[in-house]
Amino acid sequence: MFEQTFRNIDDVLWKEAGCATELDYTEQTSWMLFLKYLDDLEFERSQEAQLRGQPYQFIIDTDHRWSKWAAPKTADGQFDHDNALTGDDLIQYVNFELFPYLHGFRERASSTDTIEYKIGEIFGEIRNKFASGYSLRDALELIDSLSFGSQAQKHELSHLYEAKIRNMGNAGRNGGEYYTPRPLIRAMIQVLKPGIGERIYDAAAGSAGFLCEAHDYLRSGQNLSTADLETLQTRTFYAKEKKSLPYVIGIMNMILHGVETPNIVHTNSLTEDLSQIQEKDRYDVILANPPFGGKERKEIQQNFPIKTGETAFLFLQHFIKYLKAGGRAAVVIKNTFLSNSDNASRALRKELLESCNLHTILDCPGGTFLGAGVKIVVLFFEKGAPTRNIWYYQLDPGRSLGKTNPLNDNDLKHFVTCQGNFDDSENSWSLRIDDVDPETVDLSVKNPNKAEEAPLRDPEVIINEIETLDRESEEILEGIRWML
């Protein structure tokens, strides 16, 4: 029903000089969708209050309400073209009145977990990229035709929004870091089996795909009580995100999936001192695909017991620390983590094996992440007991993965089924921890059921080791310069 409307919105954005990429399309659609959603939500709540004979305090004041500036209506419910701002007047209003007013909610909000605070955060991070008020007027009228009135409508909108996020990821560049294939996320969730009442966390949330899928998993096929639904809304999903665009997209994505006030904090998780983490800060379930390949500054590294510039390795330490005793985690990481020979990699593998039960490693084929030429594995572990055995599964969809043949749920069914009992198969096997070299702590994927290929080293492994050595050399030189 709404698919053509989304296409039309993209057509409008395509003509705007300030909107050049899929990232821009998603960003601009997001802020308009958010305000339309908020207006529908407030109208619904005001109607409910009226039926109960109670007053309703609107969040957005009359002058800045969607129904006043974006979509004014006549008495018979038709669009009021005579009183609708357009052209330069509309751009002036949005840029210099509306956005500053909305940003001001950040300071006026009573606490950070309110919808008022989220409004202020969003409009402090995002900006209007429409230069033409006529194009913006066209987009607003299209957005106004969308409705959040029923669960079916919200469900359809969430699917369309997910498609926009997927397209943004497929577009490459930095869009890919915000999108993890949803079939992979669903398989990770099916292995961890989160339950109502457990707190679920992602410290590198991106577009909040992990939390949205976990929400859908917990809602599906269950007759939830009012208390259960309240728990899902307010005390289940927690996230942090450093970058502005995914922070905004993540909030909108969770709203469309049914979480009205998402607990997403706009912050860099790696700035936290891990030595200060207390039991109350920990979580039952962690699901994440942290960014890799980044190089963190010295002051950031000081927050971690194992010093390294590699972003993903710092996040892995963060997750281990934030996991409750008995808590479960599934974390995506580059496959080179399993075999890197630098000191930080070996120390981190040893820490993971000693403090957690790393019970499963899922090895994914190239092409799992569209637009990214890296191979990844998923680490499944439980906090509190050391690792005794690791069960490996080498995913083989039987075809090359790519944009026309992406990963699907059926590709992962055998993995999920076998993992339940750690079954051996042509693609799965177990490794006793006693058989791991204690010096190298090499956990490389070596399928004993398949003949080894020619002993050529993966170019990616070689490049990764070169980059690691370069970083270590830079750190040594930096230390020498400091002493001089």
Image: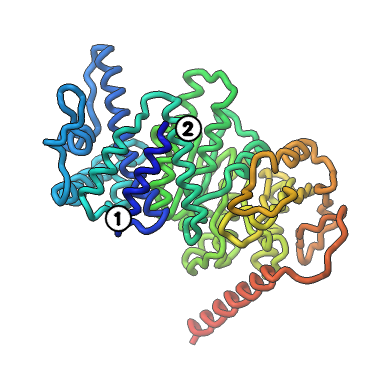
Looking at the rendering, which quadrant does residue 32 occupy?
A: top left
For marks 2 and 1, the one nearer the N-term is: 1
Task: Name the colour scheme.
Answer: rainbow
- The correct choice, above or below, for 269 with respect to 160 in the image is below
Q: Position of residue 86 (x, y in %)?
A: 17, 45
Q: Position of residue 122 (x, y in %)?
A: 33, 46
Q: On the picture, is 57 further left or further right than 117?
A: left
Could you tell me which residue is drawn at 36 percent across and 59 percent down? 20
Q: On the picture, is 239 further left or further right than 331?
A: left
Residue of label 2? 235
Residue 112, numbered label: none
SS of the residue at dot 1?
A: loop
Could you tell me which residue is drawn at 27 percent across and 52 percent down? 128
Residue of label 1? 16
Of residues 43 and 141, which is closer to you in this image? 141
Quick one: which residue is furthest to the left in this view? 82
Inspect the image, locate mark 2, and give the three-letter code of the amino acid beneath it. Arg
Count residues near mark 2 (Cα–Cα under 10 Å), then give few for <14, some for 14-19, many for 20+. Answer: some
Mark 2 or 1: the one toward you: 1
Count residues near mark 1 (Cα–Cα under 10 Å), then give few for <14, some for 14-19, many for 20+. Answer: some
Query: Is the N terminus in the top left, top right, bottom left or bottom right quadrant?
Result: top left
Quick one: which residue is furthest to the bottom in this view? 484
Could you tell me which residue is drawn at 48 percent across and 21 percent down? 227
SS of the residue at dot 2?
A: loop
Looking at the rendering, which quadrant does residue 38 occupy?
A: top left
Quote the CA–CA distance across marks 2 and 1.
Answer: 41 Å
